[in-house]
Amino acid sequence: MGKIKVKKQSTFIDMTAMSDVTVLLLTFFMLTATFLPKEPVQVLTPASVSERKISEYNVLTILIDTQGRVFLNLDDDNAKKSVLQLMGQDYGITFNDKQVRSFIEQSHIGVPMSRMSAFLDMPLSAQDEEIKKMGVPTDSTNNQLTRWVKHAREIGGDNMQIAIKSDQTTPYPDVDKVMKILVAMKENRYSLVTTLKKMPEGL
């Protein structure tokens, strides 16, 4: 008896619905994602097992690079503008509208006040290169970090969180210096930014 040959038929899968879902998910993640601010220097944070997350809003981040240079970041543009104006009053500097806009566009604060006006007059690309060479002064004779933090607290209120982010190879005395400045200001509550690692076995 002869074999009956079954005609092969091509399989067709309609992917239209899958494409729609993919586009919707992509749009959702783009609209809800929180973008990290561009940092003037790259730091590799030390690892820890702590899973406590820092708030995404009303945070003052103190960045310390491997050379001990200090940079600040405020996540609220209106707060940055107000803090700059207060710092200008302290040092007798008046900033024009263009300089204020430039200050807001620059992600981090990391320039001595004596050079701030000239810095803000530079194009943004030139600022990105120049800021890497400076940093907020923390010397005992010219401790501008204290003034920045003080004014940030005045604008951000008691709910503002402070976070310290340093490189894993940053010398401890440089980090300790910043922590002591905060303690002297009675800013005893702050977070240390770390990279999450696996909990050791047995704990």
Image: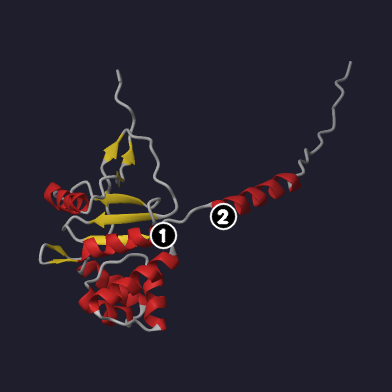
Q: Which mark is residue 75?
A: 1
Q: Residue at x 21, y 72 (%)?
A: 112
Q: Nearer the viewer, residue 140 or 56?
A: 140
**Could you say which is closer to the camera, residue 10 or residue 160?**
160
Image coordinates of residue 108 in percent, x first then y, are: 33, 65
Using residue 43 as the reference point, say whether residue 28 is left or right of it: right
> Farthest top residue?
1
Instruction: Name the amino acid type tagged 1.
Output: Asp
Mark 1 in CB contact with mark 2 (< 8 angstroms) = no
Residue 37 showing in the rendered view: no
Q: Would you place residue 133 above or below residue 28 in this image?
A: below
Tell me which amino acid carries mark 2.
Met
Among the two numbered marks 1 and 2 on one chain, the one whose residue lies closer to the N terminus: 2
- Foreground mark, 1 or 2, reads 1
Residue position for label 2: 30
**Image side of residue 145 versus residue 2, left or right:** left
Quadrant housing residue 96: bottom left
